[in-house]
Amino acid sequence: MMLAGHLKKAPLQIADSVVGAMDENPELIEKVEVKAPGFINFFIAPQAFQEIIQQILIKGKEYGRSDIGKSKKVMVEFVSANPTGPLTVGHGRQAVLGDSIARILEWNGYNVDREYYYNDAGRQMRLLGYSTYIRYRQLLGFDDKLTDDHYQGEYIIDIAGNIKEQFGDRFIDDPENEIFKKSAEEAIFEDIKRTLSDLDIKFDKFYNEKSLYDEGLIDDVLERLRAKNATYKKDDAIWFRAGDYGAAEDRVLWKSVVDEATYRLPDIVYHETKYKRGYDLMVDIFGADHHATYPDVLAGLRALGYDTENIKVLIHQFVTLTRAGEKFKMSTRKANYVTLSELIEEVGKDVVRYFYIMRGMKSHLNFDLELAKTEGDENPVFYLQYAHARISSILRNASVKGLSNTDDADLSLLSEEETLALINTLSEFSEVCILCGKTMEPQTLTTYLQRLATAFHKFYTVRRVISNDKALSKARLTLVKAVQIVLANGLNLLGVSAPERM
RNA sequence: GCCCCGAUAGCUCAAUGGAUAGAGCAUCUGCCUUCUAAGCAGAGGGUUGCAGGUUCGAGUCCUGCUCGGGGUACCA
C-alpha cells in the first residue's frame, strides 16, 4: 500500500502481483491471501507454531530475551528525590516506571545500572534541619511554632525524639548544629530505601551532588565553559549561553546575590560524569515539572562538546490523586499527602506496580485512593496472576496423574480454533519485548499480557487439558507450560509476582 | 504571552499511519456434580474535544481553536 503512490497503481493490484511472484515455503506458510484494500495475509503453518512452543520450553526463563542492546552500558536515572520526606504516590510512578524500563533493557541485552541522584545541601535541606530543631524544642517543652515554610510531617517529630533521647537538651540553643539536618537525612533515606525495597527496587548507586564539589568538578566545568566563551557576566552573575546551544534562553549558572551555583550547573556536571563513566546510553526519567530544565542540561553538554543523542529523556505526567472523586493538592512540606509506603501497605506491591505501569507515561494517572484501596478482586493484575496460578494447578493435577513427562507430546494435535489463537498470541511475545525495549513504554507489555491471559482463559473454559485422551492431554499440557513460562517472564519484567496458588 | 503533555464508550484507559477503534469497571442476560467462577459467553453503550489540511488510508502526522494539567526564577 505504501508503494501505491510510487507505482501509481491500486494497492490491490500491487498485492496481487506480489503474491503471484512469491515462492513461499509450505513448512512455514500454509496459505496467502489478498484482502481489500490491499493487505496480504499469511497463514502460518501448524509446524511453525509447534516450533514456537518447543522454543519456549527449551529456553524457559530466558525465553523472550534479545540482544538488541549488544551489551551496551546504560544508566537509568530515576526517582532522584531529595531526602526531605517519605516518597509520595507521585514518586511511586517514577520508581516503578524506571525500574521496569531498566528490567526491560536488561532483558534486551543492555548492561544496565540504576542510579539515584540527590542533593543534601540546598535550601530545602536547611529548612528540614530547622524544622527538626523546632520539633526538638517542642519536645523539650518550649512552645516554638512551625511556620508554613517548614516541614510539618509527623516523621520529623520521631527524628527529633531520637535526638532528645540521645543527647537530652544539649542542642537547645544550637539551631545550626549539623545533627538536626544529618539525623533527619539519615532517617528519611532509610525510609526511602525501605519503601523502594518493598517495591523490589534496588539502586546500584546513590550519587550525591556534594561529591561534584568535593572533587572540584564544578569549578572545572565552569572554567571550561568560560574558556569556550559559552558564558558571560551580567549583573555580577555568570550566565550560560544556553540559547546558542539549542535551549530556549540563556540561564544563570552562578548567582550574584549568594555566592553559589544554580541547580543547572551541578546537573550539567553530573551528566558529564555519565559520559566519563562510559555509558553508551543514558535514560533520564523526570516528572512533568522538570520538563523545562533538561534542555538546559543538554545545551550545557553540547557546549562541553558532547553529542547528546545518547541521552533519552522520558517525561512522565503527574499522578492526580483523588479521594472519592474529589481532587486534592499535595505537598511534602505540608505533609497533607499519602505516602508511597502507606499505599503499598494497603494494596500490596503487585497491585501498586501494575497500576503504575499499565498506563502510558504521557497520560495523567488518576489514582483514586478509595478505589485503589477497595479494588482488590477487580484489579486487572489478579487476572494475569490467576492465569498463572490456574496453570500451576493443572500441572499439579497432571503430576498426580503421572503426566509430568510430556517430552513425547504430539503437538500436531493442537489444532482447534481457541488453541491456535492462544499459540498465536504466545508467538508475539518476543516481538513485544523488543518493541518495549525500543520505545521504553512498558504498558505495551501489560496490554500484551492481558491479551495472553484472555486467550488462555478462553482456551481453558472450552478445552479441558487433562482428559482420558492421554496423547491430547500431553499436547495440551505442553502448550499450557509454554503459556505459564511466557506469563511468568512477562510478569517478572514488570516486577509483579507470578503466584502458584491464589 | 511563550513552551511541554493530554482530550477516545457513563468512569479509568489501550490502540508500529492500516482492516469492523478495543479492554476493565459500571448496567443487563446466561454458564460451576469434571483441571481454581479472581473465570467464560452474550447485550447495550462511540461523529476518537472543535474546524481545516496532508495521504490510497488519520484516534495517530500538520495548522488554527476550545478545555484540563504542568512549566516558564540568581528555588530544586
Image: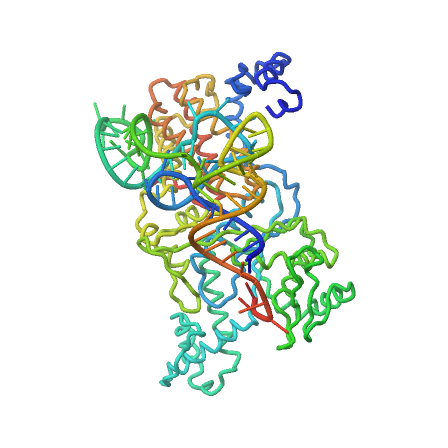
Is A64 situated above or below A424?
A: below
Quarter of the image with the N terminus of chain A is top right
User: Residue A190 appears at what percent x and percent y?
Assistant: 47, 65
Q: Nearer the viewer, residue A184 or A475?
A: A184
Is A110 situated above or below A39?
A: below
Q: Is residue A383 left or right of residue A216?
A: left
User: Residue A430 appears at what percent x and percent y?
Assistant: 54, 33
The image quadrant of residue A395 is top left
Q: Is residue A108 left or right of residue A128?
A: right
Task: Please say whether residue A457 is visible from this viewpoint.
Answer: yes
In percent of the image, x 76 and y 65: which residue is there? A224
The image quadrant of residue A86 is bottom left
Is A34 situated above or below A486?
A: above
Is A157 situated above or below A209?
A: below
Task: Please say whether residue A392 is visible from this viewpoint.
Answer: no
User: Residue A209 appears at what percent x and percent y?
Assistant: 61, 66
Q: Nearer the viewer, residue A392 or B41?
A: B41
Q: Is residue A319 left or right of residue B28?
A: right
In percent of the image, x 66 and y 71: which residue is there? A254
The image quadrant of residue A118 is bottom right
In percent of the image, x 57 and y 72: which residue is there? A121
